[in-house]
Amino acid sequence: MKQTATKIVWAIVMIVLFSCAKGKSSSGSTTPPEKAYTISGIIKDASGNPVPGARIRVENPTGDNIHFTARTNEAGRYSVTVSAIGGYKIYAWKEVELNNEVYQVRLGMEKDADYDAFSVPASGVVKNFTWKLSGRIPDRTISRENGTGYFGGTIKFINYNSLADEMPAGTQVTIQLTPTTGARYLDGSTAAGKIVEKKFTIAAGVGQAYYINDIPATHYKITASATLNGNSKNVNIGSGTPDVFHNSAEHYFKSEGGSGSFENGLGSPNEYSFYVMFAR
Protein backbone atom coordinates (compact mmCIF):
# COMPACT_ATOMS: atom_id res chain seq x y z
CA MET A 1 0.00 0.00 0.00
CA LYS A 2 2.85 2.36 0.89
CA GLN A 3 4.69 1.54 -2.36
CA THR A 4 1.52 2.21 -4.35
CA ALA A 5 1.09 5.66 -2.76
CA THR A 6 4.74 6.48 -3.48
CA LYS A 7 4.31 5.53 -7.14
CA ILE A 8 1.25 7.76 -7.42
CA VAL A 9 3.13 10.72 -5.93
CA TRP A 10 6.05 10.22 -8.35
CA ALA A 11 3.65 9.98 -11.27
CA ILE A 12 2.08 13.32 -10.34
CA VAL A 13 5.52 14.92 -10.00
CA MET A 14 6.60 13.65 -13.42
CA ILE A 15 3.40 14.99 -15.05
CA VAL A 16 3.98 18.43 -13.54
CA LEU A 17 7.64 18.48 -14.62
CA PHE A 18 6.75 17.36 -18.16
CA SER A 19 4.09 20.06 -18.43
CA CYS A 20 6.54 22.76 -17.32
CA ALA A 21 9.19 21.56 -19.78
CA LYS A 22 6.66 21.56 -22.61
CA GLY A 23 5.80 25.18 -21.88
CA LYS A 24 9.45 26.31 -22.16
CA SER A 25 11.37 27.08 -25.34
CA SER A 26 15.00 26.13 -25.79
CA SER A 27 15.95 29.59 -24.47
CA GLY A 28 13.92 29.05 -21.31
CA SER A 29 11.18 31.58 -22.17
CA THR A 30 7.49 30.76 -22.04
CA THR A 31 6.02 29.72 -25.38
CA PRO A 32 3.60 32.41 -26.65
CA PRO A 33 -0.10 31.51 -26.96
CA GLU A 34 -1.48 30.05 -30.17
CA LYS A 35 -2.81 33.46 -31.34
CA ALA A 36 0.36 35.40 -30.56
CA TYR A 37 1.04 38.59 -32.54
CA THR A 38 -2.48 38.72 -33.89
CA ILE A 39 -4.33 41.82 -35.08
CA SER A 40 -8.08 41.40 -34.92
CA GLY A 41 -11.19 43.52 -34.96
CA ILE A 42 -14.57 44.24 -36.48
CA ILE A 43 -15.76 46.54 -39.26
CA LYS A 44 -19.15 48.26 -38.96
CA ASP A 45 -21.10 50.76 -41.03
CA ALA A 46 -22.46 54.07 -39.73
CA SER A 47 -25.55 52.28 -38.36
CA GLY A 48 -23.48 49.76 -36.41
CA ASN A 49 -24.10 46.86 -38.80
CA PRO A 50 -21.21 44.48 -39.60
CA VAL A 51 -19.49 44.86 -42.97
CA PRO A 52 -18.67 41.43 -44.45
CA GLY A 53 -16.24 40.89 -47.31
CA ALA A 54 -14.05 43.93 -46.58
CA ARG A 55 -10.36 43.62 -47.45
CA ILE A 56 -7.69 44.13 -44.79
CA ARG A 57 -4.04 44.88 -45.53
CA VAL A 58 -1.35 45.09 -42.86
CA GLU A 59 1.93 46.62 -44.03
CA ASN A 60 5.33 47.08 -42.46
CA PRO A 61 6.90 50.09 -44.19
CA THR A 62 10.50 48.86 -43.91
CA GLY A 63 11.05 48.65 -47.66
CA ASP A 64 10.98 44.83 -47.55
CA ASN A 65 7.36 44.56 -48.79
CA ILE A 66 6.24 42.83 -45.61
CA HIS A 67 2.46 42.62 -45.69
CA PHE A 68 -0.43 40.42 -44.62
CA THR A 69 -4.01 40.33 -45.94
CA ALA A 70 -7.41 39.10 -44.77
CA ARG A 71 -11.16 39.57 -45.34
CA THR A 72 -13.96 40.12 -42.86
CA ASN A 73 -16.41 37.26 -42.30
CA GLU A 74 -20.22 37.50 -42.26
CA ALA A 75 -20.05 38.99 -38.76
CA GLY A 76 -17.68 41.72 -39.99
CA ARG A 77 -14.74 40.27 -38.06
CA TYR A 78 -11.18 39.63 -39.19
CA SER A 79 -7.95 38.25 -37.75
CA VAL A 80 -4.37 38.58 -39.07
CA THR A 81 -1.32 36.95 -37.49
CA VAL A 82 1.92 38.82 -38.15
CA SER A 83 5.57 38.58 -37.18
CA ALA A 84 6.97 40.41 -34.16
CA ILE A 85 8.50 43.18 -36.29
CA GLY A 86 7.13 46.58 -35.23
CA GLY A 87 5.88 49.57 -37.17
CA TYR A 88 2.81 48.11 -38.84
CA LYS A 89 0.05 50.14 -40.49
CA ILE A 90 -3.36 48.69 -41.24
CA TYR A 91 -5.91 49.60 -43.93
CA ALA A 92 -9.34 48.37 -44.99
CA TRP A 93 -11.40 48.65 -48.19
CA LYS A 94 -14.85 47.55 -49.30
CA GLU A 95 -15.78 46.85 -52.92
CA VAL A 96 -19.11 48.42 -53.87
CA GLU A 97 -21.10 48.54 -57.11
CA LEU A 98 -23.28 51.61 -57.78
CA ASN A 99 -24.50 53.24 -61.02
CA ASN A 100 -22.73 50.47 -62.98
CA GLU A 101 -19.42 51.51 -61.41
CA VAL A 102 -17.23 49.41 -59.12
CA TYR A 103 -15.70 51.35 -56.21
CA GLN A 104 -12.92 50.37 -53.83
CA VAL A 105 -13.97 52.42 -50.80
CA ARG A 106 -11.38 53.20 -48.14
CA LEU A 107 -12.82 52.49 -44.68
CA GLY A 108 -12.13 54.60 -41.62
CA MET A 109 -10.97 53.78 -38.11
CA GLU A 110 -12.37 54.57 -34.69
CA LYS A 111 -9.72 57.09 -33.57
CA ASP A 112 -7.18 59.25 -35.38
CA ALA A 113 -4.37 57.55 -33.45
CA ASP A 114 -5.39 54.20 -34.99
CA TYR A 115 -3.96 55.38 -38.33
CA ASP A 116 -0.45 55.64 -36.86
CA ALA A 117 2.17 52.89 -37.10
CA PHE A 118 2.08 50.42 -34.21
CA SER A 119 3.75 47.33 -32.80
CA VAL A 120 1.86 44.10 -32.12
CA PRO A 121 2.45 42.63 -28.66
CA ALA A 122 2.54 38.87 -28.11
CA SER A 123 -0.90 39.17 -26.54
CA GLY A 124 -2.30 40.68 -29.79
CA VAL A 125 -4.00 43.98 -30.52
CA VAL A 126 -7.51 45.10 -31.58
CA LYS A 127 -8.03 47.51 -34.50
CA ASN A 128 -11.66 48.26 -35.40
CA PHE A 129 -12.93 50.05 -38.51
CA THR A 130 -16.02 52.08 -39.35
CA TRP A 131 -17.43 53.05 -42.75
CA LYS A 132 -17.19 56.84 -43.11
CA LEU A 133 -18.92 58.78 -45.88
CA SER A 134 -17.12 62.06 -45.15
CA GLY A 135 -14.42 63.52 -42.93
CA ARG A 136 -10.63 63.60 -42.94
CA ILE A 137 -8.47 60.62 -43.79
CA PRO A 138 -5.84 61.29 -41.11
CA ASP A 139 -2.96 59.46 -42.80
CA ARG A 140 -3.39 61.23 -46.16
CA THR A 141 -2.35 64.74 -47.18
CA ILE A 142 -5.13 67.20 -48.01
CA SER A 143 -5.19 68.55 -51.54
CA ARG A 144 -8.32 70.57 -52.28
CA GLU A 145 -7.47 70.63 -55.99
CA ASN A 146 -7.06 66.86 -56.27
CA GLY A 147 -9.70 65.88 -53.72
CA THR A 148 -7.27 63.85 -51.62
CA GLY A 149 -7.32 63.50 -47.85
CA TYR A 150 -11.12 63.17 -47.50
CA PHE A 151 -13.53 60.25 -47.34
CA GLY A 152 -16.02 62.36 -49.31
CA GLY A 153 -15.70 63.48 -52.94
CA THR A 154 -14.77 66.79 -54.58
CA ILE A 155 -16.47 68.80 -57.35
CA LYS A 156 -14.75 71.43 -59.50
CA PHE A 157 -16.38 74.73 -60.62
CA ILE A 158 -14.89 77.22 -63.08
CA ASN A 159 -15.65 80.95 -63.30
CA TYR A 160 -15.65 81.10 -67.09
CA ASN A 161 -18.20 81.00 -69.91
CA SER A 162 -18.51 82.02 -73.56
CA LEU A 163 -21.84 83.86 -73.12
CA ALA A 164 -21.33 86.72 -70.64
CA ASP A 165 -18.84 88.43 -68.39
CA GLU A 166 -17.30 86.33 -65.64
CA MET A 167 -18.50 86.75 -62.09
CA PRO A 168 -16.56 89.64 -60.50
CA ALA A 169 -14.23 89.26 -57.53
CA GLY A 170 -16.04 89.27 -54.19
CA THR A 171 -19.06 87.30 -55.42
CA GLN A 172 -20.00 84.66 -52.87
CA VAL A 173 -21.33 81.54 -54.59
CA THR A 174 -23.50 79.01 -52.75
CA ILE A 175 -23.72 75.50 -54.18
CA GLN A 176 -26.62 73.30 -53.07
CA LEU A 177 -26.46 69.55 -53.65
CA THR A 178 -29.79 67.74 -53.37
CA PRO A 179 -29.80 63.92 -53.61
CA THR A 180 -31.93 62.74 -56.55
CA THR A 181 -34.97 60.51 -56.01
CA GLY A 182 -33.91 57.09 -54.74
CA ALA A 183 -30.26 58.12 -54.32
CA ARG A 184 -28.17 56.02 -51.95
CA TYR A 185 -24.71 56.43 -50.51
CA LEU A 186 -21.93 53.94 -51.18
CA ASP A 187 -22.71 52.10 -47.93
CA GLY A 188 -26.25 51.46 -49.16
CA SER A 189 -27.97 53.92 -46.82
CA THR A 190 -30.55 56.36 -48.18
CA ALA A 191 -29.48 59.88 -49.12
CA ALA A 192 -33.05 61.21 -49.23
CA GLY A 193 -33.40 64.71 -47.75
CA LYS A 194 -29.71 65.05 -46.88
CA ILE A 195 -28.91 68.30 -48.70
CA VAL A 196 -25.31 69.50 -48.77
CA GLU A 197 -24.47 73.21 -49.01
CA LYS A 198 -21.01 74.57 -49.82
CA LYS A 199 -19.73 78.11 -50.51
CA PHE A 200 -16.79 79.76 -52.23
CA THR A 201 -15.86 83.38 -53.00
CA ILE A 202 -14.76 84.51 -56.44
CA ALA A 203 -11.22 85.91 -56.53
CA ALA A 204 -9.65 88.34 -58.98
CA GLY A 205 -8.33 86.90 -62.23
CA VAL A 206 -9.56 85.03 -65.26
CA GLY A 207 -11.13 81.57 -65.36
CA GLN A 208 -10.35 80.49 -61.81
CA ALA A 209 -11.24 77.00 -60.57
CA TYR A 210 -13.00 76.44 -57.24
CA TYR A 211 -13.32 73.13 -55.42
CA ILE A 212 -15.91 71.97 -52.92
CA ASN A 213 -14.64 69.05 -50.87
CA ASP A 214 -15.67 66.14 -48.69
CA ILE A 215 -19.13 65.50 -50.13
CA PRO A 216 -20.74 62.11 -49.32
CA ALA A 217 -20.77 60.29 -52.66
CA THR A 218 -24.16 59.76 -54.29
CA HIS A 219 -26.23 61.14 -57.21
CA TYR A 220 -27.02 64.86 -56.80
CA LYS A 221 -28.98 67.66 -58.43
CA ILE A 222 -26.79 70.79 -58.33
CA THR A 223 -28.21 74.31 -58.04
CA ALA A 224 -26.39 77.56 -57.28
CA SER A 225 -27.02 81.12 -56.12
CA ALA A 226 -24.78 84.11 -55.45
CA THR A 227 -24.50 87.32 -53.46
CA LEU A 228 -22.60 90.42 -54.66
CA ASN A 229 -22.51 93.71 -52.71
CA GLY A 230 -25.48 92.54 -50.64
CA ASN A 231 -27.59 91.71 -53.70
CA SER A 232 -28.80 88.17 -54.39
CA LYS A 233 -28.34 86.79 -57.87
CA ASN A 234 -29.44 83.62 -59.63
CA VAL A 235 -26.71 81.41 -61.07
CA ASN A 236 -26.79 79.05 -64.02
CA ILE A 237 -24.55 76.03 -64.42
CA GLY A 238 -22.74 74.63 -67.43
CA SER A 239 -22.32 70.87 -67.12
CA GLY A 240 -18.97 70.02 -68.68
CA THR A 241 -19.10 72.96 -71.10
CA PRO A 242 -18.84 76.79 -70.90
CA ASP A 243 -21.19 77.15 -73.87
CA VAL A 244 -24.51 75.70 -72.63
CA PHE A 245 -26.06 76.67 -69.28
CA HIS A 246 -29.13 75.59 -67.31
CA ASN A 247 -30.58 76.43 -63.91
CA SER A 248 -29.40 73.07 -62.54
CA ALA A 249 -27.15 70.12 -63.34
CA GLU A 250 -26.69 66.55 -62.15
CA HIS A 251 -23.62 64.80 -60.88
CA TYR A 252 -22.60 61.44 -59.48
CA PHE A 253 -19.14 60.54 -58.25
CA LYS A 254 -17.33 58.13 -60.52
CA SER A 255 -14.97 55.43 -59.34
CA GLU A 256 -11.24 55.99 -59.19
CA GLY A 257 -11.11 52.81 -61.25
CA GLY A 258 -8.26 51.03 -59.49
CA SER A 259 -8.07 47.96 -57.29
CA GLY A 260 -7.93 50.04 -54.13
CA SER A 261 -5.89 53.00 -52.96
CA PHE A 262 -5.23 54.76 -49.69
CA GLU A 263 -7.60 57.55 -50.78
CA ASN A 264 -11.42 57.46 -50.94
CA GLY A 265 -11.76 55.42 -54.14
CA LEU A 266 -13.47 58.26 -56.03
CA GLY A 267 -12.36 59.78 -59.32
CA SER A 268 -10.38 63.02 -59.58
CA PRO A 269 -12.46 66.24 -59.67
CA ASN A 270 -10.28 67.40 -62.55
CA GLU A 271 -11.78 64.82 -64.88
CA TYR A 272 -15.02 66.80 -65.15
CA SER A 273 -15.84 70.48 -64.53
CA PHE A 274 -18.94 72.59 -63.95
CA TYR A 275 -19.08 76.25 -65.07
CA VAL A 276 -20.93 79.06 -63.29
CA MET A 277 -22.36 82.35 -64.55
CA PHE A 278 -25.01 84.87 -63.48
CA ALA A 279 -28.41 83.94 -64.89
CA ARG A 280 -29.45 86.29 -67.69
Image (tube, rainbow, N blue to C red):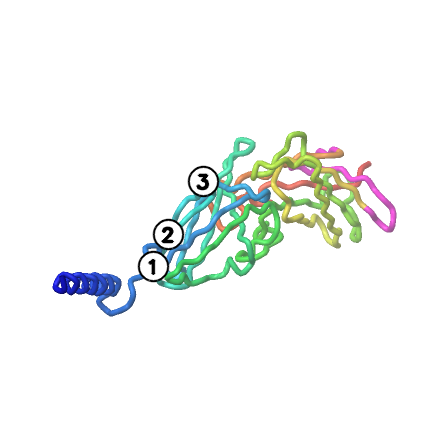
Q: Is residue 224 magenta?
A: no
Tell me if label 1 and label 3 are in contact, CB under 8 Å: no
Q: Residue at x 38, y 49 (%)?
A: 69
Quadrant containing the C terminus in the rendered view:
top right
Residue named by callout 2 = 68
Q: Quadrant of residue 98?
A: top right
Residue named by callout 1 = 83
Point out the stretch of residues depicted in magenta: 227-246
The picture places residue 108, in percent across and down from the top left corner, at: 54, 50
Q: Which mark is residue 53?
A: 3
Residue nearest the observer in this picture, 53 or 103: 53
Foreground mark, 1 or 2, reads 1
Tell me if label 2 and label 3 are in contact, CB under 8 Å: no
User: Few, some or many C-alpha atoms within 10 Å of disc 3 (few <14, some 14-19, many ≥20)?
Assistant: some
Residue nearest the observer in this picture, 278 or 255: 255
**Residue 71 appears left or right of 171:** left
Callout 3 secondary element? loop
Q: Residue at x 72, y 47 (%)?
A: 198
The picture places residue 205, in percent across and down from the top left corner, at: 73, 53
Q: Earlier in the sequence, mark 2 or mark 3?
A: 3
Q: Residue at x 43, y 41 (%)?
A: 73
**Residue 196 appears left or right of 114:** right
Foreground mark, 2 or 3, reads 3
Quadrant containing the N terminus in the rendered view:
bottom left
Can residue 270 be spotted in the picture? no
The picture places residue 182, in percent across and down from the top left corner, at: 64, 30
